Image (tube, helix red, strand yellow):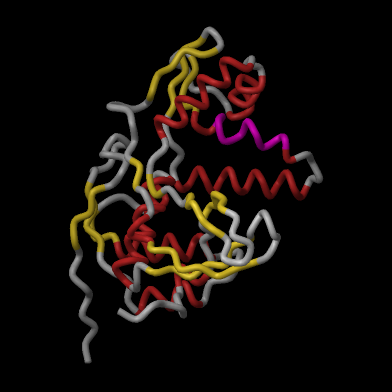
Amino acid sequence: MAFVEPEAVEVKLPSKGLLGYSEKVLIRPITGREEKIIASATGDTIESAVNRVLNRCIKEGPKAEELTEGDKSFLLVWLRINSYFPDYSVEIDCPACKKVFKKFIDLKKLPIKEIQVERLPLEIEIGGKKVDLSPLTAQEVEEVNNYRSQVAAQGRNFEDLYSVRYAYMIRAIDGKDVSLSEKIDFVEGLIGRELAKLRKAEKLLDHGIDFRQELKCPLCGKSFTANIPITLEFFLPTEFREE
């Protein structure tokens, strides 16, 4: 029997087309041809496997590496819901009783945040300079994570990572492109109220799926907020509620 590719549908992205690519993509669900890519991935190759799957499923639109972190998370959740089920089984660590409980998360109910600016890059004045900011692409997030691995390998303090993500968000300072090390020095030289401006700008740029959920532990009854973890069960579900 010949392979028949599922029909692609148009999906609007939460970045609203401000990143140089269209605000809409054509995307189709995952098939066995994509699932085998995920199934054969290891811890070291899972990110590249996810990108391959996205690039196969996106029929019109940017490459996975070009997407913002927010748009990529949004499309991954879309793929999970429309290829499999909206129910996602996760194990949650209760911060109160320190025990682990299992919960089904309805992915359709996770809030979707749209970017809150009208144009990019966003220009703000901090530290007496005009600074252009844009959300990180998926490729840049991977570079930040690689930087994290380098810090760990060198035995350096993880405090060194605090400024890196902000540095990657900076596209220009006073209209000039500067090196990553100069951006890090700039961020680390800011006083507290200037850093607060940077965090406020980051909130305006934030978009995609909000994975934070208000949960209640069934074991001790305490309520808390937790980030829903992305595990292999997200990509290759084995547990779901029958419709």
State whether the magenta stretch is mostly helix, strand or loop: helix
Q: Residue furthest bottom?
A: 1
Is residue 4 left or right of 76 when viewed as pictured?
Answer: left
Q: Which residues are magenta?
A: 159-167
Is residue 93 left or right of 122 when viewed as pictured?
Answer: right
Q: Is residue 114 above or below residue 32?
A: above
Residue 160 counted in the magenta span: yes
Q: Quadrant of residue 123?
A: top left
Q: Position of residue 5 (x, y in %)?
A: 22, 75
The number of numbered discs placed on residues in the rendered structure image is 0
Residue at image x 25%, y 66%?
28
Q: Position of residue 183 (x, y in %)?
A: 58, 24
Is residue 2 left or right of 80 when viewed as pictured?
Answer: left
Q: Residue furthest front?
A: 221
Residue at image x 56%, y 16%?
194
Q: Is residue 114 above or below residue 233?
A: above
Q: Residue furthest top?
A: 128
